[in-house]
Image: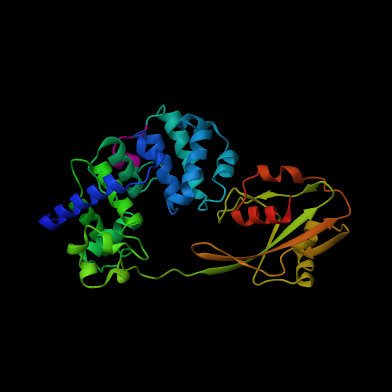
């Protein structure tokens, strides 16, 4: 893609803005690929404000890739708890083991090799390679899509095949070849803080005079994204079995949301159940095994837990048993287990 004078101005303005406005973030003071990789994995589909405390906790718990590799999966998932998209944490752990045990702690130095690591896609590989090793590869994330789309007035849907290809070429065309790492961070930061999704700061923007979207009053219309997400509704009935000191948790082992996290025994249904409907379920009867019990619904008003492609309607049924629970865990130990945020919120509200 041929570089025009306008694109050179774009680069200079973004770099200048970044120098004077960038946030002081811990991973920006290092070119250690472990730190950059960790920050990029945490910040996938996560805002910096939410991800920063997790980054700090991970670095404190696992200062190098070797400590992370030697941790148990349960430790990693527990530290990740609340960030969502838990496959990121499992992939993080898997890749840490590969780097530590097979590569003696050394990360690949090119984006093409980095992409071979589990959980590292093109964007993450480009970020690590450019920031740590100065490879001239452009990053394209949501912030970059937005800035380029508005400045150049591109209305090709960013999640279409044509759009992905076009913006990849456009990003490469305006890349600062002399300092790709800082420039990549600059354009992402510019999108996050200046050219924001809602209420962008156009009045104080150095790109305003040449921004096509601003000139045509299309800032709110760009970028364009195809809407094709179908939301699946699911109805979860958690059975919170209690005796005087114990409860039961079980791991989610199937390939589904929250794999390898822990939960109370679950009965999934096609709609919300009332007490009579629940207690007639074969799964419930098998779980109780003929024991005497008292049952009550903890949350009569059922809220919705929204995931990217699913809405979870969860009911928590408190079942107090008159007989001791033979297996299970002590209630006081429940906070040691990695659980979905939906379960964590219940545990807090219930007062375990």
Q: Residue 132 versus residue 66: which sits nearer the camera?
A: 132
Q: Tell me residue 300's x, y (percent).
A: 72, 69
Left or right: 204 in relation to 243: left
Point out the residue furthest to the front here: 204
Q: Residue 336 versus residue 322: which sits nearer the camera?
A: 336
Q: Which residues are magenta?
A: 107-114
Label count reads 0
- The residue at the point 46 percent across, 30 percent down is 64
Q: Is residue 108 magenta?
A: yes
Q: Is residue 340 above or below residue 155?
A: above
Left or right: 10 in relation to 114: left
In the figure, residue 235 lies in which quadrant? bottom right
Residue 187 visible: yes
Q: Is residue 190 magenta?
A: no
Q: Is residue 85 above or below residue 296?
A: above
Q: Tell me residue 204's x, y (percent).
A: 27, 60
Q: Tell me residue 211's x, y (percent).
A: 21, 64
Left or right: 189 in relation to 2: right
Q: Tell me residue 244's x, y (percent).
A: 85, 49
Which quadrant holds the N terminus?
A: bottom left
- The residue at the point 80 percent across, 62 percent down is 285
In the figure, residue 198 lies in which quadrant? bottom left
- The residue at the point 28 percent across, 41 percent down is 130
- The residue at the point 30 percent across, 45 percent down is 126
Left or right: 293 in relation to 331: right
């Amino acid at each position: 893609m041929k570089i025009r004078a306008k694109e050179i101005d774009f680069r200079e303005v973004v770099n200048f803005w970044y120098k004077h406005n960038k946030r002081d973030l811990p991973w920006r003071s290092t070119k250690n690929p472990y730190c950059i990789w960790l920050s990029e994995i945490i910040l996938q589909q996560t805002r910096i404000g939410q991800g920063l405390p997790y980054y700090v906790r991970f670095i404190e718990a696992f200062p190098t890739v070797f400590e992370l590799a030697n941790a148990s999966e349960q430790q990693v998932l527990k530290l990740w708890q609340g960030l969502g998209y838990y496959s990121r944490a499992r992939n993080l752990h898997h890749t840490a083991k590969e780097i530590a045990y097979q590569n003696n702690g050394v990360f690949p130095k090119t984006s093409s090799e980095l992409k071979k690591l589990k959980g590292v896609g093109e964007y993450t590989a480009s970020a690590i390679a450019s920031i740590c090793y100065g490879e001239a590869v452009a990053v394209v994330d949501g912030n970059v899509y937005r800035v380029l789309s508005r400045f150049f007035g591109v209305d090709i849907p960013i999640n279409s095949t044509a759009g992905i290809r076009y913006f990849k070429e456009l990003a490469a065309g305006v890349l600062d070849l002399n300092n790709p790492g800082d420039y990549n961070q600059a354009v992402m930061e510019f999108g996050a803080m200046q050219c924001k999704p809602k209420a962008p700061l156009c009045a104080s923007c150095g790109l305003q005079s040449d921004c096509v979207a601003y000139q045509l009053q299309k800032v709110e219309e760009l970028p364009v994204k195809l809407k094709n997400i179908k939301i699946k509704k699911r109805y979860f009935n958690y059975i919170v079995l209690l005796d005087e000191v114990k409860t039961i948790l079980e791991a989610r082992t199937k390939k589904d949301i929250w794999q390898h996290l822990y939960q109370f025994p679950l009965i999934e249904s096609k709609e919300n159940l009332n007490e009579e409907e629940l207690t007639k379920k074969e799964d419930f009867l098998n779980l109780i095994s003929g024991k005497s019990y008292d049952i009550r619904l903890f949350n009569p008003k059922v809220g919705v837990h929204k995931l990217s492609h699913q809405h979870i309607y969860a009911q928590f049924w408190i079942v107090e048993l008159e007989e001791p629970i033979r297996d299970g865990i002590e209630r006081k130990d429940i906070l040691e287990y990695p659980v979905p945020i939906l379960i964590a919120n219940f545990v807090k509200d219930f007062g375990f």
